[in-house]
Structures are given as structure tokens and as C-alpha cells.
Amino acid sequence: MTTVYLYVVGASSNPDRVACAVPWRVDDAEIFFGPCKKRLREALRPGILGPKVDRARAREDVFLVGFNALPASPRVRKLVWAGRIREAMSFGRAWLHLTGPRYEALRSARATPLHLEPVEEDGRPTAYRHFGREHAEGGKWVDDILTPETKRLARISSGTVQLAPGMSWWEGFPRDVCFLLDNLFFASGAGLEVDDELVALLREAQPDRSGVSRLAVFGLSRSGVPDGRRGGHLELTGDLASRFVRWLRSRTPRGKPPLGGASGNGAGRKKSGKRRSC
């Protein structure tokens, strides 16, 4: 089955490049998706991983697709990235195995999205320590792996989270999953236009939403402004998902690599070298 999840990259308002750490462009072939979209990651985790499986290939076609957040001016909405999940893993497994030159830029960034180090050097740890600046403010990083329920049971101190005695990795860290995706598109100078064909598909997928347009891809809120589905997403399945994938592939012809350059999200880097947290 093919499933497509569409969302707004809230930390990146540029319609022609991704200017935040999530998603992270590894190279022309691969994208790393770490923290952010907590509830979506939590929902996808059981379909790929398991209590004793901390790394596995995806068994179905699942696509993640992001639109830019709306800038103050000019008001332009484009599709800025798209990938197909190739495999899922815990942050612990990612820390241990995403190494070497290919992942050097990912690991060395100040706001790296690979921001959780397993204390036990294991892919199924019962404790993590925070690394880098991603989600450091207010200790938000713990919410990348803990739900409100498990957060009440965990011990959090000095940049470390430890599960309660007897609680397993699988039960205690319900959001502990990140993804490697096939890089289908990553804007590094030009996003994909939201054209009439895509708008028609989005309207069909959201019959209960008013005002779906090139700007308001998820319709209008009650106050009449474009709805960004903050914290949420639009899920496409069945024929709608297949049609969207055909639309996407027709705009990114086979054999033509995604827009890229050096490893990382360098095109979205500010002069200071910092990137916005997701």
C-alpha cells in the first residue's frame, strides 16, 4: 500500500530551500529525518520496528512531503522536499551506525538532528543523553522520544533521560524512531510549484476544508487564514496517494537528480552557520 504524508515545515519559510535541520539532506540519494513530527513518527514506528528490532527496512511505500511555511512577504507556497522511507531505526542505532564521511556533515552540525546519544552504546537503550543544540531550549528534546505519559515516569536531569527501572526501551521511548529516505526532491534553490493539478488533488482529498488553493494547501482556518495544520499532517492513501506520487515523479523526472550540492542543508544556512530548529 502507498501512503503519503503531507505537512508544513514550520521552521522553514523559504519556498526555494530548506532552511532548518529537519529534514536533513545527506546527499542526492538520501535524506535523514530525525526529530520533529513527533506524533507521526510515533504512529509509524510500530509498522516498521518492534520491541527487539531497532533497525529495519520499510515494508510498504511511505512518502513524507513538506511544504514551506508561509513567509511574511512574498506569500508563496511550494513543495520543498519529498522522500520515500527506506528504513527506520532508533536514535541509538542511528548514532552507532550513521558514521563515516557520508554522515560527517550531519553529525558535526551545531544543530544536528542526530541529537540523542545512547548511554549504554546500544540501539535499544534505556537512557539517552542530549547532544548539540537541536531542541535544547527548555529541554524540548525529551519530547522527541517521550510521550506525556512516559515523561512522568522517566528521570530527567543534566541533559540525560533515564527510564524507570524495569521499563523497556520499546515501552519507555514510544517516539524513538528516525528515518532514512530515498531523496526524491530537496529544494536547494527552487521549490516545486503548487500547480492546478496538485490543487485539484488536494481539494479532493479534503472535501471538508474550504479555501484549498495554491497558497492554502490545507484550506483556511476559521479566521480565514491558510491553515498550516500545526503539529499535524494530511494523509493520502489509495488512489489519491498513487496520483500524488505520479504527479511528483512527473515534476522530478527519473534520471534527473534532486537539486542538491554539498552534503547537508548548506543552501539553507544563515551567515552565522546556524540553522533553525524544526
Image (cartoon, rainbow, N blue to C red):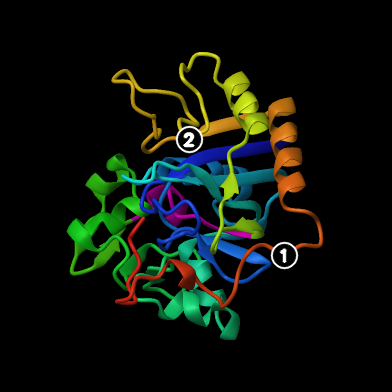
In the depicted structure, whether residue 213 falls above or below residue 34: above
In the depicted structure, whether residue 255 falls above or below residue 36: below
* Quarter of the figure with residue 246: top right
In the depicted structure, whether residue 148 falls above or below residue 270: above
| Residue indicated by mark 2 | 233
172 to the left or right of 253:
left
Q: Secondary structure at mark 1?
A: loop
- Whether 32 is among the magenta residues is no
Q: Nearest the camera: 166 or 130?
A: 130
Circle 1: residue type: Pro
Residue 133 placed where, x, y %?
29, 69
| Residue indicated by mark 1 | 257
What residue is drawn where x is 29% and y is 40%? Answer: 149
Circle 2: residue type: His
- Mark 2 or mark 1: which comes first in sequence? 2
Q: Secondary structure at mark 2?
A: loop
Asked if one can make out residue 43 in the rendered structure from this viewpoint, the answer is no
Query: Which contiguous range is marked in magenta?
Result: 166-181
177 to the left or right of 138:
right
Q: Furthest residue to the front?
A: 74
What residue is drawn where x is 49% and y is 79%? Answer: 105
What residue is drawn where x is 39% and y is 29%? Answer: 227
How packed mark 1 is, by other alpha carbons closer than 10 Å (few <14, some 14-19, many 20 or more), is: some
Q: Furthest residue to the top?
A: 208
Residue 122 placed where, x, y %?
48, 71
